[in-house]
Image (spheres, rainbow, N blue to C red):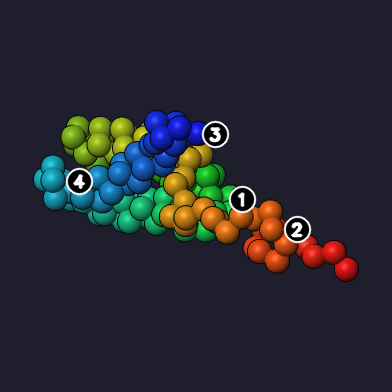
Amino acid sequence: MSTPSTAIRSKLPGWTGLAAAALLLLSPFLLGFAGAAVLSAFVLGVLAVGVKLKPMIRAGARDRWLVAATGALIVIAPWLMGFADAALATWTHVLLGLAIVVTANRSVPLRLPDRTGGDTPGTPGGPAEAS
């Protein structure tokens, strides 16, 4: 049985990764980026929020790899997009991208658990009725 503190600790990485994605999206406005850094933070922030939210709504087998790949793309974006000389934008991308990569295998389902007693015949997830 999980205690409330265990439940919180198990969900914290998922929410941390989502917060990092949202911070990347908002970073041009909060930190005053210019040029390609604004476009990169906005586009990759929207992408990161999307790929972090998708497994929370409906998980699939490839979701954690997609989240990790998005985080890795965020880490290398300053060099790909040519704004690596802007230290604040570069460090923001690298640190938030690493946070997304590290939390890639964790997601927080937005669905509530089934409380219908899944062991009862005829309930979703329960055993089939005997014929």
The residue labelled by disc 1 is 61
**Real-space CA distance between mark 1 and mark 4, rounded to the nearest whole angstrom:** 30 Å
* Amino acid on which disc 1 is placed: Ala
Amino acid type indicated by mark 3:
Met
23 sits to left or right of 5: left
- Circle nearer the viewer, 1 or 4: 1
Secondary element at image label 4: helix
Up the image or down, 77 lies above or below 1; here it is below
Residue 9 placed where, x, y %? Answer: 41, 32
**Of callouts 2 and 1, which one flags the residue occurring earlier in the amino acid sequence?**
1
Residue 8 is situated, as x and y percent measured from the top left of the image, at 39, 36
The disc at residue 11 is none
In the rendered structure, which amino acid carries the disc numbered 2? Answer: Pro
Question: Which of the two labelled residues, at mark 1 and mark 4, occupies the earlier sequence position?
Answer: 4
Camera-side mark, 2 or 1 = 2
- Which residue is nearer to you in this view: 18 or 70? 18
Label 3 vs label 4, nearer the camera: 3
Which residue in the protein does label 3 denote?
1
The first of marks 3 and 4 along the sequence is: 3
Regarding mark 2 in the picture, which secondary structure is present there?
loop
Real-space Cα separation, disc 4 to disc 2, in angstroms = 50 Å
Q: Nearer the viewer, mark 4 or mark 2?
A: 2
Q: Nearer the viewer, mark 3 or mark 1?
A: 3
- Residue 94 lies, in percent from the top left, at 32, 34
Residue that carries the numbered disc 4 in the rendered image: 27
Crowding around mark 3 (Cα neighbors within 10 Å: few <14, some 14 to 19, many 20+) is: few
> What's the residue at 52%, 58% (across, down)?
58
Say which label, 4 or 2, has the lower sequence index: 4
Q: State the mark number for residue 127.
A: 2
Residue 99 visible in this rendered orientation of the protein:
yes
Mark 1 lies on a secondary structure that is loop
Q: CA distance from mark 3 to mark 4?
A: 40 Å
